[in-house]
Image: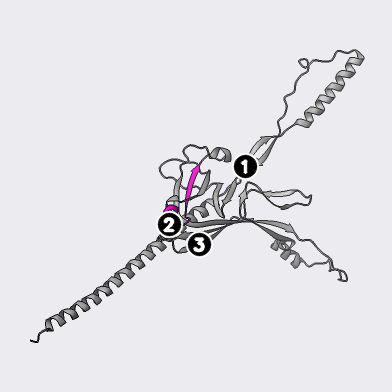
Amino acid sequence: MKKGSILLELIIATTISALVGMIILNTFSQTNLALQVATDISRINRSTLVVGSLLRGEISGIEYLSQRVEKKKKKKKKEEDKKSGGEKKKDEKKGVPSETSSQKKKEPEKKEYKRIPLKNIFYSENRDGNVHRLTFITKNPLPAFTNIKSRLARVEYTLELDRVVRRKTGKRAFKLFRRESPILAYEKFEKAKGALKYEVCRNIKNFTTEYITARRKKKKEEKKEGEEEEEKEETDEKEEKKKDEGDKQDYIVEYKNFTEWKGRQIIGKDKKGKNIKRSIPSFFTFKIAFWDDQFKNTKRFEFKIKRGI
C-alpha cells in the first residue's frame, strides 16, 4: 500500500458526506418552508371562513325594527287655551260667571302615536381607512345549545390594533373582536353587562367596507320633436305580456355608494324635495387582507352580501 492513500480516501469520504449533508439540509429547509407556507394558508383561510360565515349569516338576518312614540300636541293645546280665554272674556262682559276647571267635565285625552325606526339599526364607523366599529340588529345571532337565548340581538364588531406585533415587528396588524347582547337600544348596548368581547381573528392588515343602496325611480318620458305619435290601440296579447312583466320597463334603479353608514343615510329626494332616508343598505362588500406569520406577504379576500332593494 502506498503512503498517503488513507489520507486521500479520508478526504474523499469527508467531501461526499459534506455534500450529502448539504443535500439533506436543503431538503429539510425546503420541507420546513413548504410546511410554514401551508400553515399560513390554512390559518388565513380558516380566519376568512370564520369572518365570512359570521357576517353572511348575521347580515342576512338584519331586522328593521320600529318603536311607538307619542305624538306631540303643542299646537292644539295653544288653540284650546285661546278659545277658552275668549269664552271667559265673553262671559265676564255678559255678567255670567264662568265655569271653573273643576266644574267642567274633563274628557280623557286620546293619545296619538306614531312609529319611528330604532336608532342605528345598522351603524358602521371608519378610522384610519379601516372599519373601526360595525354594529347592527339581527335575527340570526350565534346559536347557543346550553342556555336559552333571544333570537333577536345586537351584534358589534370592533377592529383593534395589535400592540404586541407593532412593538416586535413595527408592522400594523389588527385584531377583530365580536360581542353580542339582547339589548337592542344603541345607547344602552355599550354599557350592557354580560356582553363579553372575544377575539374572532388576528393578523389583519386592513379591513374595509362598501355599502350600496338601490332605489327604484320612474322613468321620465321625453318626447322628441318630429316623431310621430305611437298607436294607442294594443292587442290583447301585448297587454298580457306587459302585465306578466310587471311594468319593469317603467322603472330604473338608482345606486349610491357609501364607505360609512351612520344611522339613517340620505339616498335621494322625492318629488316634493324631501330627503329620502334609508336605515339599512341593500348590498354589502367586505374586503379583508391578512398578514402571514412572518409579516412579509399578504393575502386578500373579498366577499359580497346581497340583502335586496
10 Å crowding of disc 2: few (<14), some (14-19), many (20+): few
Nearest the camera: 254 or 163?
163
Give coordinates of residue 25: x percent, y percent: 28, 71
> As shown in the figure, which amino acid type bears the numbered disc 2?
Thr
Residue 119, label in figure: 1
- Which of label 1 and label 3 is nearer to you? 3
Res. 60 in view: no
Question: In the figure, is residue 165 to the left or right of 283?
Answer: left
Q: Give the residue at x 73% y 60%.
A: 251
Residue 169: assigned label: 2
**Distance Cα–Cα, label 3 vs label 2:** 24 Å
Q: Nearer the viewer, residue 11 or 299?
A: 11
In the displayed structure, 255 sits above or below 61; it is: below
Q: Going from the N terminus, do you reach mark 1 or mark 2 first? A: 1
From the viewer's perspective, tell me whether residue 285 is left or right of residue 71: left
Q: Give the residue at mark 3.
A: 301
Chain part drawn in magenta: 166-181
Residue flagged by tag 1: what amino acid is it? Answer: Lys
Query: Where 56 sits versus 27, above or below?
Result: above
